[in-house]
Image (cartoon, helix red, strand yellow):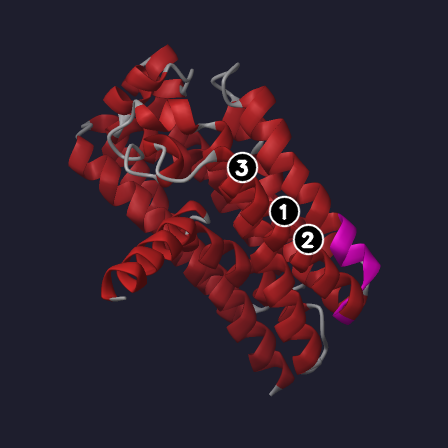
Amino acid sequence: MTTVTASSSSLWRQYWVLTKPRVTQLAVFCAVIGMFLASPGLPDPIIVVAATIGIWLLAAAAFAINCLIEREVDARMLRTARRATASGSISNSQVLSMSALVGLSGMIVLYVFVNELTMWLTACTFIGYAIIYTVVLKPRTPQNIVIGGLSGAMPPALGWAAISNAVPAEAWLLVLIIFIWTPPHFWALALYRQRDYEKSGLPMLPVTHGKPFTSLHILLYTLILFAASLLPFVIRMSGPVYAIAAVLLSGRFIHYAWRLHRNYSDELSRQVFKYSIVYLALLFGALLLDHWAVLL
């Protein structure tokens, strides 16, 4: 009995890993921020909970499909070789069944408890990431993460749609910020994992164009990101609290990128990658803090 229980627990952990929980958490966090920004006061808690669950489920399903499609690539990379899809410990049919069940559950939750617009936008995001990015873009162009970044940038729009049943310009501005943030975030990872990507056969920018070229583009994108991060203040969507946070956080990001370009090291690239995650979380947190400061 103990062996069966342990085996079952291990299987569930493997399924859980396939949903890329850390990435899913950041995406859902940005969606929740969109929900709160879409409401002049506190949004309906039932809709917030339902939308969070629905978006989480569909994101998890998309990541599982991504792991299934890239199972052979993952098997050649040290970072991903232990995934159940790469090792073969979970069959393709099991992953498909799990993803279908989880994804369909997410669509039902969004349709029944939130609204139809959010359901379809989230479903399109699923297709954009799991199919268009993973199958079409990622194996064919070093600009994969730039072109395919839109699907990963959608969570704020999904959250906004959940509350207001619309996606106004303010929501798309948040999408733009994540869209510009994605390349330097992902390229920093690709830099210190360059050997892995060489083995994978994927045309990632450090593999096709080298580290100096990639680090330069990280720097350029952080400069563009700095300008984009100030737009919520420029259009009076947010106030001085957010503006100060955006300047400080973006300034730190640019400083990291400048150091990386001037004197590259894998350790510094790893620091840039980790900071990029902190950057986005704190930037969106500052948006919410500023929004509540105005309400108070």
Q: Secondary structure at mark 2?
A: helix
Amino acid at circle 2: Leu
Q: Secondary structure at mark 1?
A: helix
What residue sits right under mark 1 in the picture?
100
Report the residue at 36% width, 22% height from top: 214
Q: Secondary structure at mark 3?
A: helix
Helix, strand or loop for the magenta stretch, by majority: helix
Report the residue at 66% width, 58% height from top: 106
Q: Is residue 234 visible?
A: no
Q: Nearer the viewer, residue 99 or 210?
A: 99
Q: Is residue 96 visible?
A: yes
Q: Nearer the viewer, residue 235 or 2?
A: 2
What residue sits right under mark 2 in the picture?
104
Number of other residues with Cα within 10 Å of mark 2, as a class: few under 14, some 14 to 19, many 20 or more:
some
Amino acid at circle 1: Ala
Image-quadrant location for residue 133: top right
Amino acid at circle 3: Ser
Q: Earlier in the sequence, mark 3 or mark 2?
A: 3
User: Which quadrant of the rendered structure holds the C terminus?
Assistant: bottom right
The residues tagged by marks 3 and 1 sit, at their Cα atoms, a distance apart of: 10 Å
> Magenta segment range?
113-120
